Amino acid sequence: MKTNLIKYLTVILLISGAAGILSSCNKEGNGSSSGGTAVISGGSRIIGKVTDGKAGLADVLVTDGSRFTRTDKTGFFIMELTKGAEFLSIVTPPGYVADYSSGAPQFYQKVVSGKTSYDFTLTKLSDSPDYNFVVMADPQPKNQAQFDLFKGEPLEELANTCKALAKDRMTIGICLGDIVQDAMNLFASYKEEIRRTGIPFYAVIGNHDFNKDLTGLDAAADFKNAFGPINYAFYLGNDLVVTLNDMEYQTAKKFEESYPEETVLFLKALLAQVPKTTKLYVAQHVPIHRWWKDAPIGRGEEVFALLDGYDVTFLSGHTHVQNITPLRKGIHDHNISGFLGAWWIIDVCRDGTPRGYEIFSRTGTSLSWVYHTVETGDKVQYEIIRPGQSSRNPNSIILNTWDVDDDWKFEWFQDGTPKGQMERVNDISYRYATEIAAAYPGYTSTYDPNVNKHFFKATPDAGAKQVVIKITGHFGQKWEEVIDL
């Protein structure tokens, strides 16, 4: 009782501006990983507590988007809000989750003028650091008709998969933006339907999630009302997911592919609290390195510099194609294909990737991933293009392998004779090209097939009768295809 009395007397003094006590608190961390936060004039001092409903949770990061502090051993925190801060949020610690019954985890509270106390209650989700991480991109319905397609077979498959995965270990989901296509009225319906997965499902802001009738960050208001801050983080087991806005929105669908200043400041302040030994996922809408331009987005080099020394997996969408790209030492980008297929016209994306999502799985020190399609789950990982079906390589057999990286192997044999590894080439998906032409005759250039790098060719000799292809995936998966000529 005496300890609690002293603590709350201290709180009263802090709220009233007792500089000496506040200075003492700041000496604990001042932005370092040990706790505390620097005090800058112009904000308002607040207090709060993070609990599991019974006891306080220690060492939980709390942020207003630019400043961070940590809870003490009783779950108590104090900080001075940055002037103009919109949200107070927590970096949910390993094994915990905020209430997600609304369809979006409530790890945040809106800052209210004059309010000085903000409490958070979390639920224990798992005692194990193992997890599944379901990563979806670009569902992007633009009207109710397309939303009805989204919530039909594809969402039913996603929900069934998430429920099955959650029986095995902690399972978390995230959508990498373009949750809708300029249809702000569908956010509420999306949240209601994504609840069917039964798991916490986070959201990233995409360019189509800004209100095209508004300007700048005001255009993000509908997204924020539905999902909270556009820069935030949460622990996934012992790994950390950092979610960033990487668009400087103007208005009327115009935007720069660039990290706004507030995004870079958030990331810098967050990483000051995170040791280099932490595995990071950086989830954002536009890839940090635009492979179609061979150039980083605006302020990309600043972000690369901040991430130097970390093990980082970028997670991005936006392009509606699938590519895994090494970017720097210890940094890769998984640019994940669209859940919408080709704009809800056909069930395959411009590069031939069937509609689906990526699943990352952590077991102890082992991390694996697989692209999971709505059509066939994990089973089918490639498209076979026969001789005569590729205009670029008409005499070759082509494998379109969408989730490939440099560790995959493609051996081929001609009439029983080994011919070595297949050659990587740029090509287009025969399936996509034929299906989009049939479904949308006379389509505009927007729907042109995507020329991509995840194709491999074997060119048999004239008179060859059979080709066998043996495929080995990144994690030792085996496939074999026999192609009679």
Image (tube, rainbow, N blue to C red):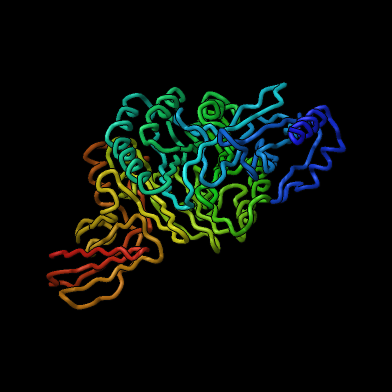
Placement of 36 over or under 212, stated as above or below: below
Where is residue 150 shown, x and y percent of the image? 33, 32
Residue projecting furthest to the front? 1
Side of 160 where 292 appears, left or right: right
Placement of 165 over or under 104, stated as above or below: below
Where is residue 289 shown, x and y percent of the image? 52, 52
Closest to the observer, 253 or 379: 379
Residue projecting furthest to the right? 20
Closest to the observer, 177 or 447: 177
Q: Quadrant of residue 45?
A: top right
Q: Quadrant of residue 141?
A: top left
Where is residue 80 shown, x and y percent of the image? 75, 34
Closest to the observer, 392 or 407: 407
Report if residue 249 is visible in the image.
Answer: no
Side of 92 where 80 appears, left or right: right
Report if residue 432 is visible in the image.
Answer: yes
Q: Residue at x 40, y 42 (%)?
A: 136
Q: Quadrant of residue 173?
A: top left
Quarter of the picture holding the N terminus: top right
Residue projecting furthest to the bottom? 417
Q: Residue at x 30, y 39 (%)?
A: 160
Q: Residue at x 29, y 75 (%)?
A: 420
Placement of 366 over or under 42, stated as above or below: below
